[in-house]
Amino acid sequence: MAHRPDAVAPLLAKPDAAAMPPPPAKRNKYPFFCAVLASMTSVLMGYNVAVTSGAQIFMAEDLGVSDAQIEVLSGVINIYSLVGALLAGWTSDRLGRRLTIVLANAFFLVGPLAMALAGGYALLMVGRFVAGVGVGYALVIAPVYAAEIAPASSRGLLTSLPEIFINTGVMLSYVSNLAFSGLPVHLSWRVMFAAGVVPTVFLAAGVLTMPESPRWLVMKGRIAEAKAVLDKTSDTPAEAEQRLLEIEDVVMNSSGNRGGGGGAWKEVATKGGVRRVLAIVLTLQFFQQASGIDSVVLYGPRVLAMAGVTSNTLLLSLNVLFGVSKAGSILVAMALADRVGRRPLLLVSTGGMTAALLVLGSLFAAFAGAKDDAAVAAVSVAAVVAFVVAFSVGFGPLAWVYSSEILPLRLRGQGAGLGTAMNRIMSGVVTMTFISLYQGITMAGAFYLYAAIAAASFVFVYACLPETRGRSLEDMEELFHTK
């Protein structure tokens, strides 16, 4: 074949720099550290909610509290959290996201300390109320701050952080239950509550080193400060400029609502897009809790005891296994939320939850009253683990991610508070009725009911939720027609 220099020359020519795609931007680590620090408050939230799971065994023996009192004490923190959830939007819009996180830490200092020192049921309820207010604040503000500080490339990861830290707190509470179970009865449960007090001061001090949310700064007219924060938290200078322009555009279009969002609520009655977003947020939060996850979180030892596990030490050890499985599974959601998207993970999650609950209900239906049956106990443990894993790879973290990112800026604080209120109401209903529920319709009937709700949540995700992966927060207003 003849040599053809004109054919080879283009292969050897220096490529046109203008025609080459730009190199991928280096991922900015700074917003990750900010979101981690803000989300650490969620560890305290998870700890305070779940520590009664093991502590109730010793509280009943020490103070003589009844099953009915335990049921109320375990679940009422979720009802009390409504106070914090409904105040969090107002507080965060006026004081800022950072100071609201500090305030949540203050509640987590006072509440558990009061419970650790309680001499009777009344003071236990007072401490539970104070801690519950902190729970409401933490549930609202941590995902809102993470969503507002994160660039679009990592928003799914960063907005998932509060959920993994909540579950880390749940896991640590189980470890605390097991670690302090060997103490004298009158000390064991008190030390379990007191252990959650220590980190609060250090976390509150650390939060003050974080930057304020750029979206809150723009809402307050502090544009230069917002630009400085965006420069630190964006992957590129061009992205920082674009984010600032988008935020300013949204704030300008809702300037009358800058202070408290009162005008935004009027849109609920007039704008179909706003109504749709609020309906999605409320329905997601309803299904997340109504499918029964907190029955396992707070009553795991009781469920397994009815499945044939008789040793208190083994029950508390298995509780730690559930906590590890639940917290570890969220890492999967964090890794995949920005890669495969929200919808696929939510569908896998709700489908897996339905299957696991059906298995668990069927075990109780077929082997009700079985004692010391190792095979039944082992399959029950596996079904519970499968349920918490399925919940945590999707529905657990992504209900919060999806809710926080689809709300328009002018409604984000208040809308997140309303969604959190729905979440806490349903959690309170589930946890305050679980003992009465399984006593009324059997343990099998309770888990079949939860399975039916999980199946309905699968249908809802499939039919009603568009994909949001990779979209900017401001772009959500185009997707959901909330401009």
Image (tube, rainbow, N blue to C red):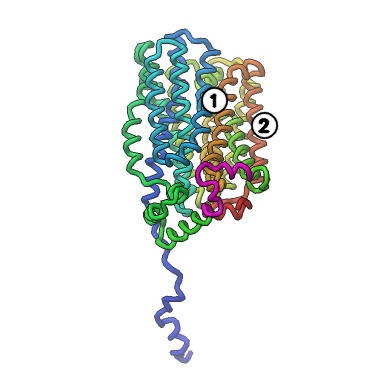
Q: Position of residue 297 (x, y in %)?
A: 51, 27
Dot 2 corresponds to which residue? Answer: 452
Instruction: Tell me the CA gap for discs 2 and 1.
Output: 24 Å
Q: Foreground residue, 114 or 367?
A: 114
Q: Quadrant of residue 197?
A: top left
Q: Residue at x 61, y 37 (%)?
A: 282
Type of amino acid under label 1: Ile
CB under 8 Å between discs 2 and 1:
no
Q: Residue at x 56, y 39 (%)?
A: 395
- Mark 2 or mark 1, which has the lower sequence index? 1
User: What number is the disc on residue 115?
Assistant: none
Q: Foreground residue, 186 or 307?
A: 186
Residue lying farthest to the front in this orientation: 256
Q: Residues within 10 Å of mark 2 (few under 14, many from 20)?
A: some
In the depicted structure, whether residue 312 falls above or below residue 464: above
The count of marks equals 2
Q: Position of residue 128 (x, y in %)?
A: 46, 21
Q: Is residue 111 magenta?
A: no
Q: Could you tell me if residue 33 is visible in this image?
A: no
In the depicted structure, whether residue 472 falls above or below residue 82: below
Q: Is residue 258 magenta?
A: yes
Q: Could you tell me if residue 78 is visible in this image?
A: yes
Q: Residue at x 57, y 37 (%)?
A: 419
Q: Foreground residue, 82 or 55?
A: 82
Span colored in magenta: 250-267
User: What number is the disc on residue 79?
Assistant: 1
Q: Quadrant of residue 280?
A: top right
| Helix, strand or loop for the magenta stretch, by majority | helix
